[in-house]
Amino acid sequence: MSDNWVVQNLQNALETWNEKLAEIWQLLTTTPQDFKGGDIWKIIVNINGAVQAIGLALLVLFFVVGIVKTCGSFTDVKKPEHALKLFVRFALAKGVITYGMELMLALFNIGQGTISTIMNAAGFGSPQSSKLPAEMITAIEKCGFFESIPLWAVTLIGGLFITVLSFILIMTVYGRFFKLYMYTALAPLPLSTFAGEPSQNIGKTFIKSYCAVLLEGAVIVLACIIFSVFASTPPVVDTTVAAVTQVWSYVAELIFNMLVLVGTVKMSDRIIREMMGL
């Protein structure tokens, strides 16, 4: 690494960004069971098991309410075809609650398969790193003390922006994991609504929302791949202008690309929900 403070500051900021981008790439391929050693997942499984009892109680409630609202009289319930329909609905709803964890893990595996397919199709196993061009490093190192003063200001602002954006990016991806855990822990409650025909839309919306959270990973991967293509072809440095102009142009374009990536990742939930009509 260069001994120049300006170069070191920019390289440290880019190194932080690259580390967070690589961490995101790894997180998107990590299962909830393996995340943070699996300790969080064990707690979520215990909570899910405890909430199942409440879900089964709500199952009976929604089932009774469904019968009252869909049957004109008790005579309708006596009809074999209607009774069979109600029995099948109740059995399926109970099965969804009892095996809700298996259902959600199956959906998660489908989501992970989509993410893996996109990664394999991209042709690289990790996102491309952003690096400071060698000609810019040379131009900065040639600057004298007074010429370096504006460079310090540009570097401080640029480095701060890059560092903040890197932490916003990683926090968004961590937030997706938190949503997955919350959906899994409380799943028996919305799944119990399948017992009643009038309330089944709540359960359908829950499944769609959970799938949307899973597919957020696909949008994040696509955004990282597009950014990596930009990172592999960094902005052209005009060596004929002053060093501060070179640094400003480079940092401004780099931050713009980073802002686009962070904005896309932040809106991944909205993008998927619009695609799914939620």
Image: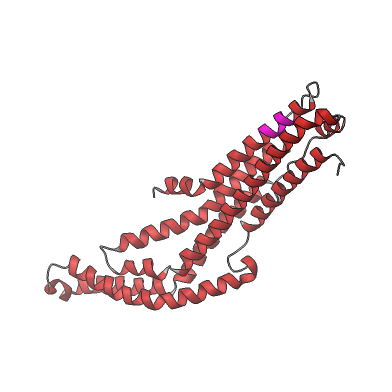
Q: Is residue 226 left or right of residue 137?
A: left
Compare residues 25 and 251 and report the one nearer the observer.
Answer: 251
Q: Where is residue 147 in the image (x, y as percent from the top left)?
A: 81, 28
Question: Main SS of the magenta segment?
Answer: helix
Residue at image location 28% in from the left, 63% down from the top: 199
* Along the viewing direction, whichever of 42 and 153 lies nearer the viewer: 153
- Residue at the farthest top position: 240
Q: Residue at x 61, y 71 (%)?
A: 38
Q: Residue 69, percent across and down?
A: 19, 66
Q: In this view, does 242 lie above or below 222?
A: above
Would you place residue 174 above or below residue 144 in this image? below
Q: Quadrant of the N terminus?
A: top right
Q: Give the range drawn in magenta.
A: 247-253
Q: Quadrant of residue 60?
A: bottom left
* In front of the other: 251 or 64: 251
Answer with left or right where residue 38 lies relative to residue 278.
right
- Residue 163, position in %: x, y? 67, 46
Q: Position of residue 102 (x, y in %)?
A: 49, 70
Answer with left or right where residue 80 lies relative to residue 236. left
